[in-house]
Amino acid sequence: MSKILQLQNLGAKQNWIGGSFHDSSSGKSISVISPYFNKEIATIPDSNSDDIDLAVKNANTAFPAWAATNIRDRAQVMFNLKSIMEKDIEHLAHLIALDNGKTVADAKGSILRGIEVIEFAISLPNMLQGESSNVGNGISCTMTHEPLGVVAGITPFNFPVMVPLWMIPISITSGNCFILKPSEQTPLAALKLAEYYKEAGLPDGVLNVVNGSQEAVESICEHPDIKAVAFVGSSKVAKIVYSRSTASGKRALCLGGAKNYMIVVPDADQDSTAKGLLASSMGSAGQRCMAASVTVAVADVDSIINQLVEEAKSFQLGVDMGTIVSKVALERITGYIDEAEAMGAKVLVDGRNPSPPEGYPDGYWLGPTILDGVGPEWPCATEEIFGPVLTIVRTETLESAMKIENENPYGNAAAVFTTSGQVAKTISESASAGMIGINIGVPVPREPFSFGGWNESKYGHGDITGRSGVDFWTNLKKVTSRWPESTETWKKYF
Ligand code: NAD
């Protein structure tokens, strides 16, 4: 592996409030560790309610002028941002790789997906023209999308730029002022994003980044001047953030964890299916909510599994796959593999204790792992492992495969690999999930289609991107008008 990532210490990072960096008043800090090196690369503040309050005050001050700015000018900032990010993509991708553990190529891909949401926000002037109709004799009604005010987003470690970009561009182009609380594990890129926004012409205070952990999140949920909260992370925390935010009168949309199933039937195309299963389960080292981590193998699909195993064995760590985000996560994932083996699973590919790539001996490495002969009720087949582990559950009928998929409480994504239209139609109609792939292992709907799951993968209504995102970040205002018949004064002009 070529030396693509240098260990560097970026020092004590601050919060971004009102267009510049600020110390936190908490006096507490969090160490940011690079999973490539197992070394501290920066510290960030562990912010408290006073820091959130300062951000809210700045955002509130910026709101009237930003909301009054015409939407074309707001969209122009997004246009500028896209070009700044495209020019600096190498630098940003390296920052993401450094604190998250992704490969630089994977990090770049995730930035490009985030930029697609910026492009969608650039198109908002063409979408948010409102509606108007004559609803009665002499009576007209117009309906417009109005910003909510100060809003907030709380994001997970696994996509440090893409997930914030699911929220910020649509929210602020719609006229809101935003407070982002990024993951304390991967905070570096979000601070850079705030600087790009300033360079793009965003007025101070419209976007604020407050670092921290539980206290910062709870302060967001409770703050009386924050109107809406979007959250992306585990289901456990999604549920907490949803109930605390809505209890304090906020609008909330909280995307949670996932366990996604790929149903493979014997008529599936061997090569593209094996590659699709591998890319879905091992991409981003399995640390993504769209990773399909269970293959439900219907009847004899051994030729596909054999190819999958061979290709997984040829994976090069540091090239095809980065690291696990933290030591704790590495231990959790390895625990699932150990447990499945002890329960009788066949370990077709074993990623435990791999040889680290040269130059990165201390990284949190785990190779692709494939477990076969697993019972549908085992923890590795039902719980979110969030690592490069593919579990194979065998079954004889499509009906029982669908039952396995539908019994899982999550509902982010599901996929089917087949060359039969009838099978594809049956699965896509019956799967209890928000995003369905037909011969696609990572069925992320690209803009303008919206992103979001069902069941315990989401608390709240609607999706996070696309038109659904606009609905979340705005209120509808309806103006019904009737003007009196022309008076004597005006009649002379007609
Ligand atoms: P996490 O839930 O641990 O953390 C997410 C955010 O919540 C972070 O900003 C963190 O600081 C905060 N947080 C953590 N514990 C908290 C607590 N007790 N109280 C208040 N705030 C708290 O998630 P993670 O480990 O960073 O990310 C991985 C999870 O995110 C996985 O479950 C994955 O499926 C999910 N995810 C879901 C989607 C989706 O679209 N559904 C997308 C990406 C990631």
Image (cartoon, rainbow, N blue to C red):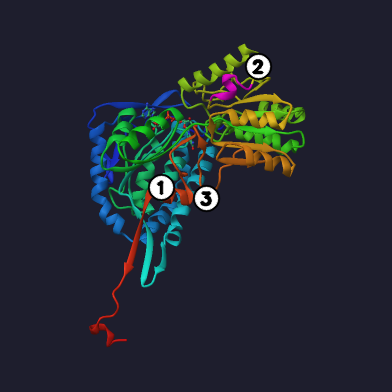
Residue at the image position 37 percent from the left and 68 percent from the top: 140
Q: Nearer the viewer, residue 187 or 262?
A: 262
Sequence-earlier tag: 1 or 3: 3
Q: Amino acid at mark 3?
A: Glu
Q: Secondary structure at mark 2?
A: loop
Q: Amino acid at mark 2?
A: Ala
Q: Amino acid at mark 1?
A: Phe
Ligand 1 lies under 8 Å from the Cβ of mark 3: no
Q: Position of residue 236 (x, y in %)?
A: 43, 27
Quarter of the picture for ligand 1? top left
In the displayed structure image, the side of residue 164 where residue 333 appears, left or right: right
Q: Is residue 462 above or below residue 75?
A: above
Q: Position of residue 28 (x, y in %)?
A: 27, 26
Range of magenta residues: 376-383
Pointer 2 residue:
345
Q: Is residue 395 above or below residue 141?
A: above
Q: Is residue 431 above or below residue 205?
A: above
Q: Position of residue 178 (x, y in %)?
A: 33, 45
Can see residue 235? yes
Pointer 1 residue:
472
Q: Of discs 1 and 3, which sits in the foreground? A: 1
Residue 239 sits in quarter? top left
In the displayed structure image, the side of residue 470 where residue 302 appears, left or right: right
Can see residue 294? no
Residue at the image position 56 percent from the left and 20 percent from the top: 379
Disc 1 residue crowd, few under 14, some 14–19, many 20+, Cα 10 Å: many
Q: Secondary structure at mark 1?
A: helix
